[in-house]
Image (spheres, grey):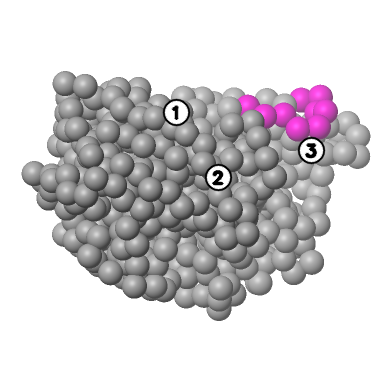
Amino acid sequence: MDAHLQQATEHGVDVIWWTDHDFRMQAHGYRQAVRFEGLSEPENGKSWTWNKIVEGKPDLAVGTFVNEPHSPDEPGKAMRLQAQAPGSAWGALLYEGVAWNSTYTTSLAATILELDVLAENLGPDAELLVRVLSSYRPATAGRRAGRYTLEYRIGQAAGRWTENDGLLGVVGLQVTPGTWQRLRLDLESDVAALWPDVVAADSGIHRLRVGIRSRNGALASGVVDRLRFLRTRRDGDESVVLQDEMMREYERRYPAVRQFHGTEISLVRHLNAFGGNFTLPDYGDAPPNKVTTVEAALAMVDFVHANKGLVAFNHPLEDAPSGPELARLLIETNALGADLIEVGSKEDFEESVFAYDAAARNAVFVTATGVSDDHGGSDWVNQKQRWITSVWADSTDEADLFAGLRAGRAWFWDPQQWRGQLDILVRGTVPMGGVLVTPAAQAPVTISVTQLPDAATVHLVTGAVDFAGLSDPAPATSSRQITVDPNEGRAHLVLPTRTGYYLRVEVRNADGDVIGFSNPVWILKDEPRHGIPAERRGTYGWAQ
């Protein structure tokens, strides 16, 4: 959250809905135990694998699964770790846990790791390690930006300190040789103690590694067993309360950015749920498997709408993997009943536009958005996928934002190449996203585009609205370049309206790549059989 808020502030983005995966917020179906039975250890049919990592140049780096010794509270095997490095530099052996679908990656808030350890030969030059690779954070409190790591060093040293310019937090733990001991590693408390200036709960468990290290020729040896993930504050909407606590703290630190609750509903075709009477789905005891049926997605859209939220259909090509397939789905299901759809996403842009235009041909009224799908927050502008969506709204209150988004009063843009504004106004009353039903033979249209870069061009895309349906699930579009007055930032056109059609605008760079994408305006001869949403009617009042 910290990193994204810093990026939002830097780039003038004034609204964020948080959209972590719902099942990750709740740790639903997450790994609870590792018993060190071998390099591969399934739990409830979900895989866990230990991947070996060697750091430095140890002469000896061996991990062995042994029958004896093992924890008195864990029957079966344990893992003996041994390392020996000849010089003054540390040499380490680590095993990184890889869980099916990253099912231990979540916030470390309210999480304790339990690990049973047996110190065989540990000391100042020989230590067991538990390493948690955590979150990227922006520069703060004199520390550079980077990924933070929490490392427990088990041996003779005790205390807390930081290394690596403050990005590595170390907790030294003393143990008694020759006897099994249970470590309780309170991750959130240790982050708070090591970096008191950060919001500790806003830290992830990105990767978990267990290992041993040696220097100065010492033989390091120890045994580990019975790893447990003890998580609280995850049931039901407890994770939403946890998120709310972090949001309130960040309101103070980033006052220019409005924050709202949201989530990516992930165990159906992926949907974003935004705000409203925000609550997470209850998956009960179901495993964390994605159900890809259309029926499951429709039911989840209804669930969000019943709670007064807004729904986005995310990276929609994932389960309809071509433009024509997605077009059929959007036409047949009215875009799943969603309010928004990610046209600019991690998936093929041209295929997504194909499907969106085919839906618009059938007056499927769903608002096009563009997203970055950025999970790290390190650099919004210089990543490959970097769309940002803007919306015309009366304020940054959620109700006003919802009204604008439902009405299609939105455009998305590439912040690396263009940061202007985009709008359409038909007959002086019907704005971008709206629908005009008129018997007139022509209509005046004003296209507003500001801050065009050098060599950028503006293109008017028009498409027939003939309700071809599934008999021809494809666009019927044409495109032409238009001239925008550089002083006024507008183009004034008079377009024929003898047949129904829609129009939208693209801003393109010198290479012809789309760097700005508007929502359409529909100009129809008759009202469609499925009606027109109130927010999209030309008389709704957007142009007042």
Tell me the kind of residue under disc 1.
Answer: Glu
On screen, residue 160 versus residue 462, left or right, reads right
Kindly identify the residue that appears in the image at 38 percent across and 57 percent down: 425
Query: How many numbered circles does the render carry?
Result: 3
On screen, residue 215 versus residue 409, left or right, reads right
Determine contact: label 3, label 1, CB under 8 Å.
no
**Span of residues in magenta:** 52-60
Q: Is residue 451 visible?
A: yes
Tell me the kind of residue under disc 2.
Answer: Thr
Q: CA distance from mark 3 to mark 1?
A: 54 Å
Determine contact: label 3, label 2, CB under 8 Å.
no
What residue would you read off at disc 3? 214
Q: Nearer the viewer, mark 3 or mark 2?
A: 2
Is residue 53 found inside the magenta-colored segment of the image? yes
Please name whichever residue, 361 or 10, is drawn nearer the observer in this view of the structure: 361
Tell me the kind of residue under disc 3.
Answer: Ser
Q: Nearer the viewer, mark 2 or mark 1?
A: 2
- Residue at the farthest right position: 87
First along the sequence among labels 3 and 2? 3
Q: Quadrant of residue 137?
A: bottom right
What residue would you read off at disc 2? 483
What residue would you read off at disc 1? 350
Mark 3, other Cα within 10 Å: few <14 / some 14–19 / many ≥20: many
Is residue 416 found inside the magenta-colored segment of the image? no
Residue 105: where, in percent of width, then height?
Answer: 48, 45
